[in-house]
Amino acid sequence: MTQEHLFSISELAAMFDISSRTIRYYEEVGLLSSENRESLTKQRTYTNHERRRLKLILRGKKLGFSLQEIKEMIDLYESNPEGEVEKKRIIEFADRKLEEIEEQIVQLEMLKADILAHKEKYIDKKG
Amino acid sequence: MTQEHLFSISELAAMFDISSRTIRYYEEVGLLSSENRESLTKQRTYTNHERRRLKLILRGKKLGFSLQEIKEMIDLYESNPEGEVEKKRIIEFADRKLEEIEEQIVQLEMLKADILAHKEKYIDKKG
DNA sequence: AGCTAAGTATACGTTAACGTCAACTAAGGG
DNA sequence: CCCTTAGTTGACGTTAACGTATACTTAGCT
């Protein structure tokens, strides 16, 4: 494996235009890992793996999910289910989320249609 | 115009499975009107118009918008722009919102694809 | 008349998701 | 060696969106 580039907390923060505090908070609630400190300085370092995780977190936030919900979804991504029962549980969770997402898309399409209709109403009406 | 049915606050709350407190709060922040009290009792009454407004509010919430954003959008629905400048401002706002919504839909589709991929990974892998 | 159910206003409490500030440490430059 | 820069761990502050409790009023029974 090739040497992966390591990022500092402020580098990572700058990449996504968030604060270092936010990253530490995500770690506090278990959304990002706190391992891989620089042994001497005790400063946090991040790999591309954590960078991708953070990207997923922020996407979830933009979509209106709570950090708790995001945590459950990311845990889904990284779970390695042992046995049929676990696998079934995970698949059911995935299906529930997929339904939620479908519903959100439908609602967004409706909102979009509403706004479009009102916009055109104002364009048509003589000012 | 036919007599419109009037709802009490708890009737309205029950319809949408929310609390009366929530409705009063929406009024407090200007999302619902506080007019049309029953003259003697001073109790709040609601028409179908307010019921529709509340439905819009709750849709917005489900989509992850803040009450402030929802207020701006609903104001858009009910605004009656005077003059070209106002109309232009409103159309621009609508266009910004439409872009946001498009972006959200795109992101939701990506999330959906991600979850689907992971789900199928667990289905394929032998347990 | 007395009681209950439903509503009102006021106000303090709560949770999530951070912001901000204080006190400290470690690395690197001049 | 001193100073600046970047990071660390607490810990308290803040805002949105309500929840909850308290004290009071009114309508409708019985």
Image: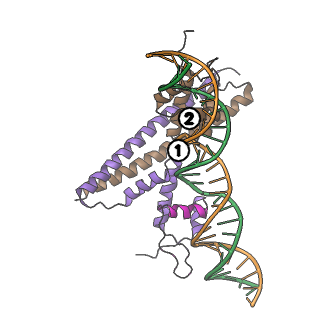
Chain colours: A brown, B purple, C orange, D green
Q: Is residue B81 above or below residue B39?
A: above
In the figure, residue B19 lies in which quadrant? Answer: bottom right
Please give the name of the residue rendered at 59% of the width and 36% of the height, measured from the top-left corner.
Answer: A70
Q: Amino acid at mark 2?
A: Arg
- Is B81 colored magenta in this rendering? no
Residue B25 at x, y percent in the picture: 55, 61
What span is in magenta?
A: B18-42
| Screen quadrant of the N terminus of chain B | bottom left
Disc 1 designates what residue?
A103
Residue A48 at x, y percent in the picture: 54, 20
Q: Is residue D15 above or below residue A53?
A: below
- One can see residue A91 in this view: yes
- One can see residue A94 in this view: no
Disc 2 designates what residue?
A21
Q: Secondary structure at mark 1?
A: helix
Q: Secondary structure at mark 2?
A: helix
Residue A122 at x, y percent in the picture: 29, 56
Magenta span: helix, strand or loop, mainly? loop
Please give the name of the residue rendered at 47% of the width and 35% of the height, measured from the top-left corner.
Answer: B107
Q: Are marks 1 and 2 on the same chain?
A: yes
Query: How far apart, in angstroms, are the residues tagged by discs 1 and 2?
Result: 33 Å
Q: Amino acid at mark 1?
A: Glu
In the displayed structure image, the side of residue A16 where residue A87 appears, left or right: right
